[in-house]
Each structure stands twice: as C-alpha cells, then as structure tokens.
C-alpha cells in the first residue's frame, strides 16, 4: 500500500502542479487581456479626440457662417424697425399737430416765434418812445 499511497501522492502533486500551472496561465491571460484593453481604450480615446477635432474644424466654419448670417438678419430687422418707428413717430407728430391746429392750439415753435416778434416790437416801441420824449423835450426847450 505504500506504493499505492506514493502513487496517489505523486498524482496529487502532479494534479496540483497542473492546476497551479493552469491558474497561473489564466492569471497571465487575464493580465494580458487587461493590458490590451487598456492600450486599446487609450488608442480608442485618442482616435475619438482626433475625430472630434476634425469634426470641430469642419463645422466651425459652417457655424460661424450661420452666426454671421443671423447677425446680419438681426441688424437688417433692427434697421427696418428703426425706420418704421421713425415713420410712425413722424406720422404721429403730424396728426397731433394737425389736431392741435384745428383746436386752435399753437405749436411751441409758433409760440416762440411770436414771443420773439413781441420782444422785437417792444424794443422798437421803447426806442420810438425815447425818440418822442427827446423830440418833446427839444420842442419844449425851444419855446
């Protein structure tokens, strides 16, 4: 039995060695797979970055053209709106002036012009009065 026992122990040792060798090979295969996956992931990431840069450079011009186009349209609409607003303001002023004139209410410019004419007339009247006083004094002193 000792030879059978020895044979069993040898087989067990051989089986343990094979299992240990297989486990080591599985472990090494796993490490290799992990390393390969890590390398591939890095390369994949780098490729994605490169493709993203290419796409960005292609689309940047298109986006910039669209932005300029939209800005131009906004400016055009703004100019039209300003022109329309100016025309509406002018029409409003004309209508209000017409309504005030029909009511007998004069515009500020007309009132200011009348005030200036009154001031000029008062100045002339004052000058005429002074001349009349001088003339009367001269007539009185002759008598």
Image: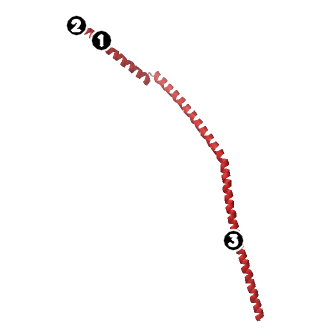
- Residue that mark 1 sits on: 131
- Is residue 121 found left or right of 45 in the rendered image? left
- Residue that mark 3 sits on: 31
Residue 79, relative to residue 2: is it above or below?
A: above
Question: What colour scheme does the image use?
Answer: secondary structure
Do the residues under discs 3 and 2 have CB atoms within 8 angstroms?
Answer: no
Residue 83 seen in the figure: yes
Name which residue lies at 74% across and 78% down: 22
Query: Which one is earlier in the sequence, the residue at label 1 or at label 3?
Result: 3
Q: Nearer the viewer, residue 56 or 88?
A: 56
Secondary structure at numbered mark 2: helix
Residue 1, relative to residue 84: is it above or below?
A: below
Write down the quadrant of residue 14 in the picture.
Answer: bottom right
Q: Nearer the viewer, residue 3 or 122?
A: 3
Front position among marks 1 and 3: 3
CA–CA distance between discs 1 and 2?
15 Å
Write down the quadrant of residue 87 in the picture.
Answer: top right
CA–CA distance between discs 1 and 3?
124 Å
Residue 106 seen in the figure: no
Residue 3, given in percent of the width and then of the height, sits at 77, 93
- Is residue 137 found left or right of 53 in the rendered image? left
Residue 53, relative to residue 69: is it above or below?
A: below
- Residue that mark 2 sits on: 141
CA–CA distance between discs 3 and 2?
138 Å
């Amino acid at each position: 039995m000792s030879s059978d026992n020895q044979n069993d122990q040898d087989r067990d040792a051989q089986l343990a060695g094979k299992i240990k060798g297989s486990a080591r090979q599985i472990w090494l295969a796993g490490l290799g797979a992990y390393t390969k996956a890590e390398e591939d992931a890095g390369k994949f990431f780098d490729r994605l970055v490169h493709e993203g840069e290419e796409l960005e450079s292609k689309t940047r011009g298109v986006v910039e053209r669209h932005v300029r186009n939209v800005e131009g349209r906004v400016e055009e609409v703004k100019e039209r709106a300003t022109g329309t607003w100016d025309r509406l303001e002018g029409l409003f002023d004309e209508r209000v002036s017409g309504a005030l004139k029909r009511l007998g209410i004069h515009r500020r410019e007309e009132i200011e012009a009348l005030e200036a004419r009154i001031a000029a007339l008062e100045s002339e009247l004052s000058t005429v009065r002074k001349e009349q006083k001088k003339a009367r004094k001269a007539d009185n002193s002759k008598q």
